[in-house]
Amino acid sequence: MMIAASTACGKSGTPQGESDAEIIPCLGGLPASPVFGAPPITCYLFIESDTPPAMTIAANISSYLDQNRYELVHASLDVAAGSRAVFTRLYQNEALQAAAHADVMRMSGETISALAGMPVSIKDLLDVAGETTLAGSVVLEGHPPAVADAPVVARLRAAGAAIIGKTNMNEFAFSGVGINPHTGTPANPADPTRIPGGSSSGAAVSVAIGACVAAIGSDTGGSIRIPAALCGLVGFKPTQRRVPTAGTIPLSPTLDTLGPIARSVEDCLLVDALIADDPLAPPVLRLAGLKFAVPEDLVMDDIDDAVARAFTSTLSRLSATGATIVEVPMKMFADARDINLFPPIEAWAWHSRLLSDHEDRYDHRVVQRIRLGARFTPQDLQRAHAARVAWIASVAQAIAGFDAMLMPTVPIVAPRTEALLASDQAFFHANRLLLRNPALINLLDGCALSLPCHRQGDLPVGLMVAAPAMADARVIAIGRAIEHALAA
């Protein structure tokens, strides 16, 4: 499928042309829409209606900059429509219009953003004007629709991105596993018998199956980095304050963060530049001379053999480039779980009334975690905030002089889905391990990347590069250097 003509203009009406062509009307290069109404002068794009060639996205965004966007998005929508439990809603018409618009602009020599006309997905907890935001639930069905797009969605649209759909997630984002009894559980593309990780399960899988160049997820305790690690992708958790979280269903407003999942660090940087308040300008770094802290405490506990092998091998390869790796005592990590009471306390405040009326419409595992917040008082929340400030200071002191921390994103490879469905005990054990390492960085108010570090053919393993708040540009720069070193 390809654009055959794009310059024939005339009065409104059906254009002359072959009867088997697909016709996309545009006004001044802009697709007709309910917002602009019927245009008085119409420019037509003639699209051959032959079945498009089989295509899935399997490379970085830069590989598709010269690609016909309409063709790319059409193929992406086919992949999305054929997937199971990955998307909760598709935006076929809107996405194709955005793609056609980008093609017109591109062929007219106009400057467009790197994401213009590119297929992206958004997590089901982001508001889209006119729709009820469900956040992977059924209990919110019938609630009032959103009156406006979330700022992040609006910024993607302004950049011309082709938002192809909303992606599946754990109910109300309250798990790192990726299982949802209402909307189904996306299969991990690395091994369909295993979980994808969560809560941004569909976001990661939408990229991994080649339906999108990037996805927007949320991260309260690792929900971008966990599925990125388990699906062999790159996930970026920016410093929370850099990206607006308005227009989302909250889990914990203290910790909730929005960010990208993509195939490369560079692609995450491209998306971050569009959704953040201010774009980053990361320097080009060489690993030689950089100094990394590897925490001695907690992050390596209960690690499985595959993760240990991949992590140890990665550290050896980084050392060979001239980077310095130092094991650092981090005794304060043991206190993190007792301090980090924010998700249950803040979730209980949001859900308590809904639960009192409709508990039977919730995932029972989510209910158990939300109800943990019922026993805490406002004074407990104040004490947690104060303890967090002191904890952040202690971590900053321990890693002063280091360029970043390195640790396994999660200490296990993706567990098998059936085992977790069969046992609440197994589910909560896996959930605790998956959340443990990445949640440290949320508590730190920090920023982090998860990068694939496994051998080809092995189950995916993630390497986490993390630093304190507002060190995002340095983390991206280090991530690019590590990505390059591991690809060599």
Image (tube, rainbow, N blue to C red):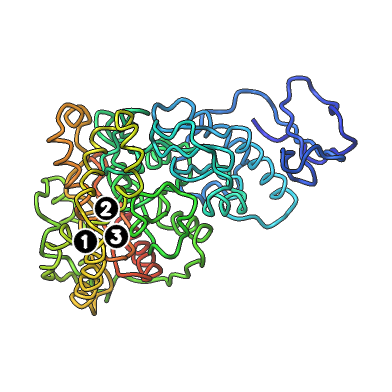
The residue depicted at 46 percent of the width and 54 percent of the height is: 267
Q: Which mark is residue 480?
A: none
The residue depicted at 27 percent of the width and 53 percent of the height is: 345
Residue on which the image places disc 1 = 380
The residue depicted at 41 percent of the width and 71 percent of the height is: 284
**Amino acid tagged 1:** Asp
Nearest to the eye among marks 2 and 3: give it. 2
Q: Earlier in the sequence, mark 2 or mark 3?
A: 2
Gap in angstroms between the C-alphas marked 1 and 2: 9 Å
**Amino acid tagged 2:** Ile
Residue on which the image places disc 3 = 442
Nearer the observer, 134 or 121: 134
Mark 2 crowdedness (10 Å alpha carbons): few <14, some 14-19, many ≥20: many
Gap in angstroms between the C-alphas marked 2 and 3: 16 Å
Please, is residue 136 above or below residue 472 in the view? above
**Amino acid tagged 3:** Asn
- Image quarter where the C terminus lies is bottom left
- Image quarter where the N terminus lies is top right
Residue on which the image places disc 2 = 345
Q: Residue 91, percent across and down?
A: 57, 34
Q: Earlier in the sequence, mark 3 or mark 1?
A: 1
Residues at marks 1 and 2 touching, judged by CB atoms closer than 8 Å? yes
The quadrant holding residue 27 is top right
Gap in angstroms between the C-alphas marked 3 and 1: 19 Å
Q: Residue 344, percent across and down?
A: 25, 50
